[in-house]
Each structure stands twice: as C-alpha cells, then as structure tokens.
Image: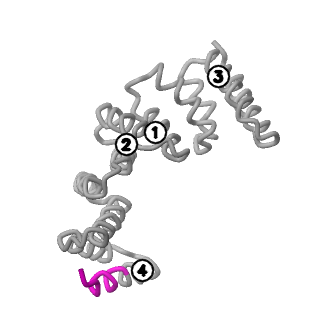
Amino acid sequence: MTTAPDARSEIAAAVDAYRVDGSVARLLERIDQAARTSDPDTLAAAVEPFRMIPEVAGPAYEHIVAAKPDDARALVTLANAYWVTGRGPEQVAPLASRAIAADPDNRAAWHLWALAEPELRARVERWRQVATRFPGDQLARANLADNAASLASTEHDLEALDLAIETYSGMLALAERDEEKRALERAITTLREWKL
C-alpha cells in the first residue's frame, strides 16, 4: 500500500497538472493509479483538499464507495460530485438513499435525496420531510418554500401557495440579517399578491 503522503503527493500533482493542461483523461488515469495503490481511507485523505472539484472527487469516490459501500460520507461525496456534473437523479438518488440508510442523521444525504426527485409535487413532499426531520435546517426550509412556490405557480395550487407563504414566514421569524429579512418580506408580499 502507498503511504498517505505518497497518495497525497500524487493526487496533488495530478490536480496541478490538470489545472495546467486540462486533460481529463490524464487526470482520471492518475486518480485511478492512486486508487489502485492506496486503501480507501488513504485515498479519501489525499482527495480531501480537492473534494469540491467534481472531476477529482467523482472518480476517486467511485473507488472509495466500491471498497466501502456503506460509508455515508463517501456516498454523499460521490452523489454530490455526480449531481454537480449533471449525472441526474438516476445516479444520484440511489446513492443518497444508500447514504440515508447508512446514516439516517446525515443531512447532506437527505438534501441530495430531495434534490434528486424529478417530479415537482413529490420534490415538495421530500423537502417537507427533510424540513420536518431537521427543523433548524434553514436551507431545507428555503428549498421547501421555493419548490412549493414553483408548484403553486405551475399548477395553480392554493395549498402549495399557502405552504410557501407559511414556510417563508417561519424563516422570517428566525432571520437575523437585514438583507435576509427584506428578501423574505418581498417574497411573502409577492406570493400574497398572486392570483391563482
């Protein structure tokens, strides 16, 4: 097995070269080489500084998930890399569901699970589940309100409109920054003026 510093050096060098030459094929080849000579934890540590680069995280975490199929963090990282690169719900949703099964308290897994729902009405219900499960999660509440507003607009759904207004109002009650309060007040005012 390769020691952690060697894997780190190889991944860092691969990313540096990729930033210069833009060769995805060469990047993938070097990540694959590091994956074949490292254990999954070593590879994860080596990739950590580049986890937000989907061209790095995706291929590396495919290897990590293959070796550790029940690791919620690895599943979420791979699902996120897939989502960012446009892989779509077909590939993201199963990974998010597996991550939830492995760690029901992994909020990022729940977010990806809700995002990956292609049908708007079902996506609203998923965001409602996430917001209920994690009541302090303002991002989940914002997604619930945004999706409910979209549903109200596209399907002239009064219940969805009420849900959007109620959710934005709850967020307003907790808002601390002035610009956030103003944005929420504008959203609520706009929604209350809608004629469905």
The residue carrying pointer 3 sits among few (fewer than 14), some (14 to 19) or many (20 or more) residues within 10 Å by Cα, namely some
Counting residues from the N terminus, which is met first, the one under dot 3 or under dot 1? 3
Q: Quadrant of the rendered structure where residue 57 is? A: top right
Q: Nearer the viewer, mark 2 or mark 1?
A: 1
Residue behind mark 1: 79
Residue behind mark 2: 109
The residue at the far top in this view is 1
Is 1 displayed left or right of 26 in the figure?
A: left
Identify whether 121 is placed above or below 83: below
Residue behind mark 3: 32
Counting residues from the N terminus, which is met first, the one under dot 4 or under dot 2? 2
Q: CA distance from mark 3 to mark 2?
A: 26 Å
Q: Nearer the viewer, mark 3 or mark 2?
A: 3
Q: What's the residue at 63%, 30% (across, down)?
A: 46
Mark 4: which amino acid? Ala
Q: CA distance from mark 2 to mark 1?
A: 9 Å
Q: In the image, residue 131 lies at what x, y percent?
A: 27, 57
Residue behind mark 4: 183
Circle 2 — which element?
helix
